[in-house]
Image (cartoon, rainbow, N blue to C red):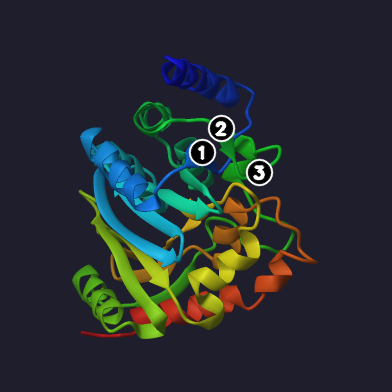
Amino acid sequence: MRTLAALLLALLALPAAAADGALKPFVLASRGPGDAAAATTALRAKLEAAGFQVVGAYDPYPGATVVAFTDGFLKAAAAAAPGASYGAVLRASVTKVGDEVQVAYSNPAYLQHAYRMRTDLGSVGRKLATTLGALEPYGSRDGKTPRELKGYHYMIGMPYFDDPVELASFSSHVEAVGAVEAGLAAGRGGARKVYRVDLPGTEDTLFGVALSDGCSGDATIMKEVDFKPLRSTPHLPYELLVSGGQVKALHAKFRIAVDFPDLSMMGSHSFMGIRCAPDAIEGALKQVAGARP
């Protein structure tokens, strides 16, 4: 009964959070003692039972597992707005922090506005709250309003959502997808495939890419930016989009900042600590895209 009451309170709180305009990047589903492997198995089972499709999973570093998932509604919503294909896949995670296991997921409402999607993802958020739980949104002290997210940039001179990095160009979508698949299979740039999702009715294919080399590595970046008690593991993995014959990605300066909007520019645990990461990520993804079949 206590668990049911907590879930009902969480569900009631979600519309209130949306009404006052404050949105945060992640939602904490549950936390407490437990076995991370068992929690991961349960997470996948719950998502699939709710009708979501698990499209990939990986362990970016010890103690962390990311599960990527989508469904028909998310794919249609992502395909309905130009450039919004990055929102086709959400991420859930299981993170072992000391003796505690934290289960969390991307906040669909936050990504809806940050990725300029035209479809309301409120129903997805409510479905995830029912399926996985919703103890609290987190990842930003004060949150961001939908208006702030739609035009989000960390500071003057930083990239916006619609300033993607152009990685490569090919004569066709088929050729571009083939090049990316070959590059990931070969592990170019220290990258490997976590998932691939083709968006129906479009020439858009979204890849989730795990990175492991040096300054672009998932573990290297998260060690610097993900240091608070509630871990933001659903930030991973990074996306690579093939749209027609073009291969591109969100600028890493935008992609990291939008999920860590409170991170300081200077000092300990700051953007300065990963100043080499944006160029390194771009370089790694360019190596992937440049690998022709």
- Asked if residue 213 lies left or right of residue 180, the reply is right
Q: Residue at x 53, y 50 (%)?
A: 99
Q: Please determine whether, in this image, residue 51 is positioned above or below residue 227.
A: above
**Depth-wise, is mark 3 or mark 1 nearer the camera?**
1
Residues at discs 1 and 2 in contact (Cβ within 8 Å): yes
Element under label 1? Answer: strand
Quadrant where the N terminus lies? top left
**Which class describes the residues within 10 Å of circle 3: few (<14), some (14-19), or many (20+)?**
some
* Residue type highlighted by circle 1: Leu
Q: Position of residue 76 (x, y in %)?
A: 28, 41
Element under label 3? Answer: loop
Q: What residue did someone put label 3 on?
A: 140
- Asked if residue 171 lies left or right of residue 212, the reply is left
* Residue type highlighted by circle 2: Glu
Between the C-alphas of marks 1 and 2, the distance is 5 Å
**Depth-wise, is mark 2 or mark 3 nearer the camera?**
2
Q: Position of residue 193 (x, y in %)?
A: 30, 69
In this view, the residue in front, 193 or 132, is: 132
Q: Please determine whether, in this image, residue 120 is positioned above or below residue 270.
A: above
**Which class describes the residues within 10 Å of circle 2: few (<14), some (14-19), or many (20+)?**
some
Mark with earlier residue (1, 2): 1
In this view, the residue in front, 9 or 183, is: 9
Which of the labelled discs sits on residue 28, or is there none? 1
Q: What residue did someone put label 2 on?
A: 136
Q: Please determine whether, in this image, residue 91 is positioned above or below residue 143.
A: below
Q: Which residue is drawn at 20% across and 84% down?
A: 293
**How many badges with numbers are in the image?**
3
* Residue type highlighted by circle 3: Ser
